[in-house]
Structure formats: C-alpha cells, structure tokens
Amino acid sequence: MDEEIRTFLLRHLQAVQENNLAAYHATTAEDLTLYEWWVTPHRLDGIPFHEFMMTANAARGSVFGAEGKGEKSSTRFDLSNLHIQRYGDTAIASYTLLISTATPEGVKVAAHNESRVIVKLNGAWKIVHVHKSPAWPAPHVQP
C-alpha cells in the first residue's frame, strides 16, 4: 500500500470529520468535482457546497454521516477495503467509508462506497474528484 497517499487521505478525511476548513482547503483542489448520491443525481462543482456543509455541521456539533440530533457525540471513521492505485502524480483511492456514531440508543454506522482521485499539484497532493455511491444494493431502475 502506498503510505504517502494513505496518510494524505486520512488527513483529508480527518479535516472533513473535524469540520476543519483550513485543512480541507489545504487538501482539496479549488476545481473539485463530486457526485454525492444522497444529495443530487447531478455533479457538484467546486468546494462552496462543502464549505457550507462543514460550517453548518460545526455550528451544531455534528459531522457528515453522524446520526446525532445536534448533540455532541463521539464519532469515528474507518476505511474498509482501502485500495490505492498510484500512477506517478495521480492516485485513486477506493474504499467503503464507515462512520460510527455513539448515540444514547447505541452505536449507529453509516456506510458509503467512495472513490477519490488525488493529484499532485504544485508539489502538494489535492483531492480533485470524489464519487460516492450507496453501500447497499441500490435498484438498477429508478423507483
């Protein structure tokens, strides 16, 4: 496994979990493109969407994928089946993101399949594209 890319990816995901905008900007390209299946069936461009989401989450004490109702809760993420493909200054990381949140009712786990394209730009690794899909059997035909 490519430890340089793995370490970078974990730093990026930690920034998202902590709603750390400075670290998010340091690890994300301005022209980011992404697909987030639960938000819209269309591509999202740029990082303003995530800036808004992270600022709102920080204000209510939650993180992406957490099941809490606004109260602060203990949350962690794990990367299941992480696979990294590196081609020079480009890498692709694919995995199932597991977000576990402690709630008064017990631990809740949200899962999403993700691919992140990472490119070295001006000497620094940046996320340039993200594609997320459900980690459950989605129908092939729209309901």
Image (cartoon, helix red, strand yellow):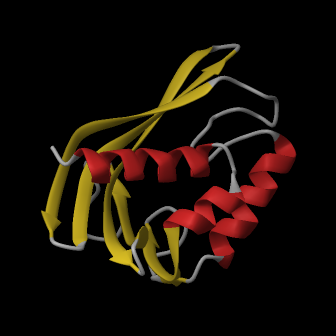
Residue drawn at (53%, 25%) of the image: 108
| Quadrant of the image occupied by residue 91 | bottom left
| Residue 140 appearing in the image | no
Residue 94 x, y percent position in the rendering: 24, 54
Q: Quadrant of the N terminus?
A: top left
Question: Residue 89 vs residue 67: left or right?
Answer: left
Q: Left or right: where does residue 116 sit relative to residue 99?
A: left
Residue 27, horizontal then vertical, whole percent: 51, 64
User: Is residue 82 at least partly visible in the picture?
Assistant: yes
Q: Give the residue displayed 34% in from the left and 59% down from the top.
A: 133
Q: Nearer the viewer, residue 115 or 70?
A: 115
Counting from the top left corner in percent of width and height, residue 52 is at: 75, 67
Name the quadrant of the C terminus.
Answer: bottom left
- The number of numbered discs placed on residues in the rendered structure image is 0
Rendered location of residue 35, percent (x, y): 42, 72
Residue 2 in the image: above or below residue 115: above
Residue 93 figure quarter: bottom left
Q: Residue furthest right?
A: 59
The image shows residue 9, relative to residue 122, as above or below, that is above
Left or right of 94 on screen, residue 35: right
Q: Residue at x 69, y 61 (%)?
A: 22
Q: Is residue 69 left or right of residue 86?
A: right
Q: Nearer the viewer, residue 96 or 108?
A: 96
Q: Height in image: 12 above or below 34?
A: above
Residue at screen point 33% across, 68% down: 118
Find the residue positioned furthest to the front: 123
